[in-house]
Image: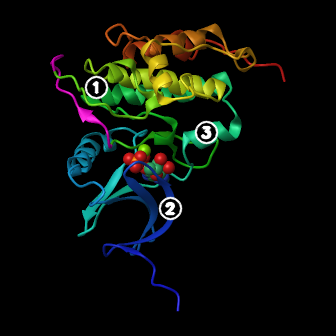
């Protein structure tokens, strides 16, 4: 006899695993009554012990913003059992941006600019709502469908924070994914919205080259490279087809001093994202 299918409290039946991150497993979930598919983030309460506030925070942030923007994953439902917490999202069937970059090697500049423009505009919306995401990276950017021109969606608000407007309210805990973390996070001098712009610089670099700028042999060397902004547009063969305007966009996002780093609104006005500027198209 085959085992009974796993059920998510009363209404859903779980299917295949879609992905997993730091604290959660995300499974496909079918709403039994309607047959509709969702993505269900299953969080083990024991693993999260003492950090349940992170999930409550994720829910609070999503409730505040997720229905207001077409490029943010929508929280559809939320429930819990003795052992688990469940966040049920609209399903993105197109996979992670990370996998698309790996499959392609890298993006053509014009396609990269289109994606970055959409993501940056969504980051501006998030910041305007008083929220800092703090974990922007290609694993947390999902395509809504498998179509080549599918909408890109910002996911995983597990590390996000609501920021009060006063400048004094800076965050100091070390968190995020090392390769995408801004220098001020390591320096513990306080951080806020500018960390998301730094991460956008790393993501843009990755889109254009197919590798990340601060990859080093050890975590310590990686941190030192980030703190001193030590990266290059090299090896040359990976950058030969990339315009100076694109490189300038990356450079501005990767401004070491968070106080001088441009905002999402300013980066949206950068020449590289200006849709009238023709992008370098390599010879076939
Ligand atoms: P964690 O906080 O553990 O990193 P995420 O929210 O990032 O959890 O989810 C982990 C992974 O699950 C994502 O990187 C992605 O591959 C997959 N995933 C998350 N949400 C969805 C969704 N709405 N649709 C499809 N896959 C998803
Ligand atoms: Mg994640």
Quarter of the image for residue 255 reads top left
* Residue 219 lies in the magenta-colored region: no
Q: Which residues are magenta?
A: 158-168
Instruction: Please tell me how crowded label 2 is: few (under 14), some (14-19), or many (20+) other residues with Cα within 10 Å.
Output: some
**Nearest to viewer (mark 3 / mark 2):** 2
Discs 3, 2 touching: Cβ within 8 Å: no
Which element type, helix, strand or loop, lies under badge 3? Answer: loop
Q: Is residue 77 visible?
A: yes
Which element type, helix, strand or loop, lies under badge 2? Answer: strand
Reading the image, the residue beneath label 1 is: 128
Instruction: Mark 3 or mark 2: name the one nearer the start of the chain.
Output: 2
Q: Which mark is residue 17?
A: 2
On the image, the x and y values in percent for residue 10 come to 31, 76
Taking depth in this image into account, of 75 and 242 the one nearest to the observer is: 242
Instruction: Mark 3 or mark 1: name the one nearer the start of the chain.
Output: 1
On the image, the x and y values in percent for residue 38 come to 43, 60
| For residue 181, side relative to residue 271 (left or right) | left
On the image, the x and y values in percent for residue 24 come to 39, 54
Instruction: Mark 2 or mark 1: name the one nearer the start of the chain.
Output: 2
Discs 2, 1 touching: Cβ within 8 Å: no
> In the picture shown, does residue 248 fall above or below 113?
above
> In the picture shown, does residue 28 fall above or below 261?
below
Name the residue at 41% across, 21% down: 197
Cα separation, mark 2 vs mark 1, equals 34 Å
Taking depth in this image into account, of 265 and 18 the one nearest to the observer is: 18
Reading the image, the residue beneath label 3 is: 149
| For residue 46, side relative to residue 41 (left or right) | left
* Residue 159 lies in the magenta-colored region: yes
> In the picture shown, does residue 150 fall above or below 223?
below
Q: Is most of the magenta stretch helix, strand or loop?
A: loop
């Amino acid at each position: 006899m085959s085992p009974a299918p796993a059920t998510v409290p009363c209404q859903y039946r779980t299917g295949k695993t879609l992905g997993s991150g730091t604290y959660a497993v995300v499974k496909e979930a079918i709403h039994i009554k309607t047959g509709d598919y969702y993505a269900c983030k299953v969080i083990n309460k024991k693993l999260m012990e003492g950090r349940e506030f992170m999930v409550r925070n994720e829910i609070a942030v999503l409730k505040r913003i997720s229905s207001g923007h077409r490029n943010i994953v929508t929280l559809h439902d939320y429930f819990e059992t003795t052992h688990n917490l469940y966040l049920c999202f609209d399903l993105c069937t197109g996979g992670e941006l990370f996998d698309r970059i790996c499959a392609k090697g890298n993006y053509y500049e014009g396609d990269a600019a289109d994606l970055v423009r959409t993501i940056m505009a969504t980051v501006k919306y998030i910041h305007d709502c008083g929220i800092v995401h703090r974990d922007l990276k290609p694993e947390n950017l999902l395509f809504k469908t498998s179509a080549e021109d599918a909408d890109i969606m910002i996911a995983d608000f597990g590390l996000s924070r609501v920021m009060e407007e006063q400048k004094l309210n800076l965050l100091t805990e070390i968190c995020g994914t090392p390769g995408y973390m801004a220098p001020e996070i390591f320096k513990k001098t306080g951080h806020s919205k500018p960390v998301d712009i730094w991460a956008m610089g790393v993501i843009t670099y990755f889109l254009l080259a197919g590798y990340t700028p601060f990859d080093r042999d050890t975590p310590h060397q990686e941190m030192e490279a980030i703190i001193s902004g030590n990266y290059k547009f090299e090896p040359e063969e990976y950058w030969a087809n990339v315009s100076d305007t694109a490189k300038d966009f990356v450079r501005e996002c990767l401004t070491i001093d968070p106080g001088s780093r441009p905002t999402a609104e300013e980066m949206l006005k950068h020449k590289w994202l200006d849709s009238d500027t023709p992008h370098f198209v390599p010879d076939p």
